Amino acid sequence: MNFFEGLPFFLCLIPVLLAALALGIAQKPLRYYTLAVSLLLIVLVLKDSPRQLFYLAVFFFWEYALIRGYLILRGRMGRKGGLYGLVMAAALFPLAAGKIAGLWGSSFFGFLGVSYLTFKALQMIIEIYDGVITAAPFLEYSGFLLFFPTFSSGPIDRSRRFGGDWQRTLSREAYLRLAGDGIWKICLGLVYKVVLAALFYRGMNLAAEGKEWYMAAAYAYAYGGYLFFDFAGYSLMAVGCGQFLGIETPANFCRPFVSRDMKEFWDRWHITLSHWFRDFLFSRFIIRCTRKRWFATRLSRASAGFLVNMTVMGMWHGLSASYLLYGVYHGALLALTEIWQKKSKFYKTHKNHPVYRAVSWFVTMQLVMFGFLIFSGRFLELFG
């Protein structure tokens, strides 16, 4: 059984959501129920893998110990860069160890959702350093980290936003509006994932049979469609289930295939991940570059920031050559987009012209689809 896949999961999900609906209509708090059913469903999903359950438990308490310990030390010692770096490294260690071990085929510290859970924990540590987070109640931390709709594949929520939803009790009218919208998202997500993703998957398999360039192009488009409908469908169902539980998880996709440049694409595709990197890596890299005067111009800083940001994002997906190349590729595209938009007189003159917008959209989509070909691993299989 896996989250949002297969009949067994949905047979478990239906009574969970019906009970949440009854509590919501009765205007009862949903937070403790949410935590209880999250624990139950995680155990059911991982019951055939005791090792994963063990790693999850170790990770859960390790990250909480770091967060609570850093809260105390931050209060006593203030913003100490060395201590902050040490805590961040310790929080990243389980994910890094699992990724590195995976290169040799080992499952050491590999468990479902480790990448997404790590980013949730890191966000809390970063905002403790910033002085924004000053407390981390155990039950709220547990509800945030183990929230079952987003456990394995996001969207990546923020602890303070989640905490506001976790603590509130909605009126009957507000809850019914939220749950009604949740039903629509779950149904649309099912169509995306079960019907449309399956159609693109069949096309992807057919295109994989050929090695000609046009079959590689067909594979890229089919894979892009499959990836979108599978992941966007999952995300919609996760958001919809969250709404039944009173949690308004942020959306993860917003019509990415209407994007007219790569910056717009990453503002529409896997939004919670790209915005996490923007807020917690890219922006901080730019600030550090400015303070240290590593680059002479703002444009140089931004270009370097895009390359670093997307390369790390590629590493987050995995340490295989395809993921690393995918990260560097998108970093280079974002840097070139930034240079073009800041330096080109042609762009500034024609950016709102319908013909330019149409051509820009077409070019962007070809670049996006080529990126999907790299991400899939098929590019290196054919041309590596």
Image: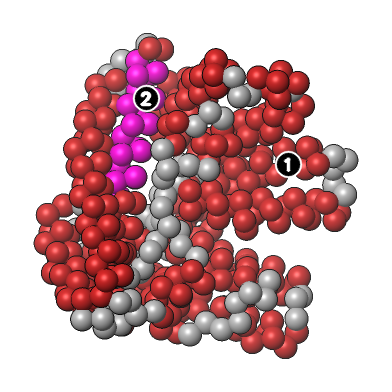
User: At 46% across and 42% down in the image, what residue appears?
Assistant: 269
Amino acid beneath label 2: Tyr
> Measuring 42% from the left and 50% from the top, which residue is drawn there?
252
Magenta range is 215-234
- Quadrant showing the N terminus: bottom left
The secondary structure type at the circle numbered 2 is helix
Is residue 204 in view from this perspective?
A: yes
Residue bearing the label numbered 1: 302
Q: Can you tell which quarter of the image residue 135 is in?
A: bottom right
Residue ID at (17%, 60%):
9
Residue nearest the viewer, comparing 45 with 177: 177
Identify which residue, 354 or 341, lies in the foreground.
354
Res 276 → quadrant: bottom right
Q: In this view of the protein, which residue sits in the foreground, 143 or 77? A: 143
Q: Which mark is residue 221?
A: 2
Q: Position of residue 203 (x, y in %)?
A: 25, 24
